[in-house]
Image (cartoon, helix red, strand yellow):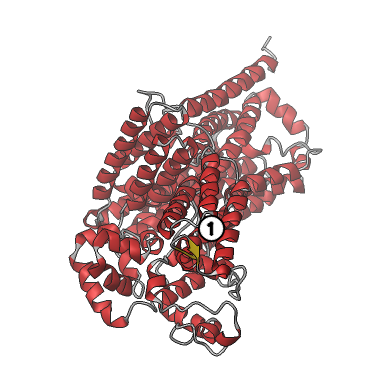
Amino acid sequence: MAVFLLPAVSSNMSWRPFVRLILAALLAPLLFSQTARASEPEVQTIWRLLDYVAVDYPGAVSGGKIVSAAEYAEMTEFAAQVEGRLKRLPQKTAKPQLLVRAAALRHSIAAKSAPATVEEQSRGLADALLTSYPVPLAPRSAPDLARGAKLYTENCAMCHGATGAGNGPGAAQLDPPPIAFTDGARARERSLFALYQVITQGLEGTSMASFGDLSDADRWALSFYVGSFAYPESTRSAGRKIWEKDATVRAAIPDLAGLVGKTPAKLADELGEDKAGPLTAFLRRQPEAVIQKPAGSLTLSRERLEASLKAYAAGDHDAASDLALSAYLDGFEPVEPVLAARDPDLMAKIEMAMGHLRSAIGKRRPVAEVEAANAEVARLFVEAEAALAPEQASASSSFLGAFGVLLREGLEALLIVIAMMAFLRKTGRTDVMGYVHGGWVSALAVGALTWFVATYFIGISGASRELTEGFGSLFAAIILISVGIWMHGKSNAEAWQRYIKEKISAALSRRSAWFLFGLTFLVVYREVFETILFYAALWAQGNGGAMLAGAASAAGLLAVIAWAMLRYSARLPITQFFSWSAALIAILAVVLAGKGVGGLQEAGLLGVTPVTGFPRITMLGIYPTVQTILAQLAAAIILAAGFWLNRAKTPRPA
C-alpha cells in the first residue's frame, strides 16, 4: 500500500499536521474522560454533606428544640452548602428538582423539624443526586485491611485512639472532639462510602484534615478498617455462616458498591437486626467475599437498567440516558470480549438491543415503549450470564476466542503495513523501511505498556475504550481515502512514468519517513489496543494455555499471509500493483469509517438511529444504524468521485 505516501510525497508538505492529528486521535478519549469527570469531586462533596446531616441532625434538634447550638449551626451551614454547590453542577434535566429538594431541606432545618423528616429528606436528595450525576461509589478491588491498620496507626490513632474510641493522646486538645468509631448508634447510620468521603476531603469546621494525598486504594483500606471498630470480631464467624448459607443475603449485597453504599441501619431494615450486625462485622473485615462470585455476572448492568427506567418514568431523560449507557459501558463492556468468543450472535443482539433502548430514550418515546426495550435488554443479559458461566469456559472456546481475535484485528493492520513495505521495495526506497518497522514495533511496545498501566495503576473505562477505537478508525479511514485515490491515479502507466520523472527518491524526505512511522504506529496501535482488551478478559476466565496456543496459531497464520503478500506483490507489474492496492485501500477505508462511527456510538458520543432488517457484519464495519450507513456511503462516494476524476484526467490513447 503505497498507501500513506500520498500526502508524504510532496516535498513542501510538513508531516507535523498529521502527527498532531494522530496525537489528537489518541488523546481525545482522555480529554473526553477528564471533562466527564470534572464534576465528580463536587458531587461527592454534596453527597458527604447530606450524609453528615442525616447522621448528626438528631444531635442538634430534639422535640422541635435546639439541644446543641454548635451542632445546629453546623447543620444550617451544611444545608446552605448543599444548595450552593448544587447550583454549580453542570446543567441537567433533574437539576431544578434537586434544587427544590435542597431548599426544602434547608427550610426543614430552619424550622427545627423532626430528625426523621430531615433524615428522610437528606437520604432522598442524596439518592436523587447520584441518579442524575453518577459517580464511582466503590473500590476497584477488595481493600487490604492489613494496610488499613498500618495507615490508621500512622495517621489516626493519635486523635481517635488505638481502638477507635476517640480517646487518643491528642484528643483533649481538639474542639470539637474526634469521633468515636466505636459508637454503635453513630456507626449504624454511617456507610463505608461516607467514611471514604470524609477521609478523602476532610471535614470543614473540625480538625479532621483531608487525606486526599493517599492513593485511592489506601483510602478505601482505611475506610474499611475504621468501619469495623463498632462491630466486634467475635461476631465475625456468625456473619460468615449467614453469608455462606443465605442466598437472599448475597443478593442484597451483590457487589462492592452495594457493600460500601448501604448503612448497617439500611441493611437491618432489609434483612433484620439479627443478621445485619454479624454480616457487617464479617464483610467489613473480609470484603473479598463479596466479589467472589461467578464470572460474567451482570448485576451492575441490571441495576443501571432498573435505575434508568425509574429515571425515565420520573421525567429525567438525561439521567435515564446516562444510566442506560453506563449499563453497557461499565457493566457489559468488560465481559464483551469473552461473550464475543463464546456466542458472537448473542453479543450482536445485545449491542443492537442497547442501541434500540438508547434511541427510544433519546427520542422521548412513551414510557411503555422504553420499558419494553429495557426489558428486552435485561432478558438478553440473563442469556449472556448463562453463556458466561464458568462451566462454559472450555479450553476450545478459549483457543478459538484468542485465535479469532488476533487474526481479525491483526489482519487489518497487516494489510496496510505489508502494502507500505511492498511499495517501498518496488520504488527502491528500502532505506526508509526502518521507519515502517519502527512504527509497528513501537505500537506493540506502547500496547504492552497500556496493558500494564491499565492493569496495575488505572482503569480504562468502557467509554475510553470505544473512543480510542472510534477516533483511531475514523482517522485511519480519512487517510486511507486520500491514499486510495492517489494510488488509483498511479495505476496508469503514463501517470507512473510522470511520477518517476518527479524524482520520487528526492520526494521521500526525512519528514515523509517520519510520517510513515506515525501512520504505521496509529494503525497498528488501534488493533493492539483492542486485542489487549480482549485477551485480558479471556485470560481472567482461565485456560491460559489454550489461549496462548490460539494466539500463537493466529500469529503463525498472519506470518504466512505476510510472506505470501510480499512475495506475490513483488511479481506484480507496478501499475497493476497500484490498481489492486487502491481497491484494497478503498475497501478498508469504508470498513474503518463504519467501525469508527460505531465505536463513537457505543461510547455515547453519537446518537443511534436503528434500521430494522439491515444486516450487521462487524468485520466489515456494517451496523444497522443510520449513522454508520451514512458514514460508509460518504466514504464510498468520495472514493468513487476520486477514481472518476483520475480516469477523466488520464489521456485517451490515439
The front one of 280 and 628 is: 280
Name which residue lies at 70% across and 46% down.
Answer: 19
The front one of 145 and 502 is: 145
Label 1: few (<14), some (14–19) or many (≥20) C-alpha neighbours in 10 Å: many
User: Is residue 455 visible from the viewing direction of this image?
Assistant: no
Left/right of residue 300 with respect to residue 531 in the rendered view: left
* Extreme residue in the bottom direction: 169
User: Is residue 496 visible from the viewing direction of this image?
Assistant: yes
Name which residue lies at 46% across and 60% down.
Answer: 54
The front one of 551 and 531 is: 531
Name which residue lies at 29% across and 47% down.
Answer: 342
**Disc count in the image?**
1
Specify the quadrant of the image occupied by residue 165: bottom left
* Extreme residue in the right direction: 12
Left/right of residue 520 with respect to residue 278 in the rendered view: right
Quarter holding the C terminus is top right
From the top left corner, tell me how far across and down residue 508 is, in percent: 74, 42
From the top left corner, tell me how far across and down residue 169 is, in percent: 55, 90
Left/right of residue 539 with respect to residue 485 in the rendered view: left
Q: Amino acid at mark 1?
A: Gln
From the top left corner, tell me how far across and down residue 119 is, in percent: 43, 57
State whether residue 583 is above or below residue 241: above
Label 1's element? helix
Q: Label 1: which residue?
A: 44
The front one of 326 and 407 is: 326
From the top left corner, tell me how far across and down residue 589 is, in percent: 55, 32
* Extreme residue in the left direction: 245
Quarter holding the N terminus is top right
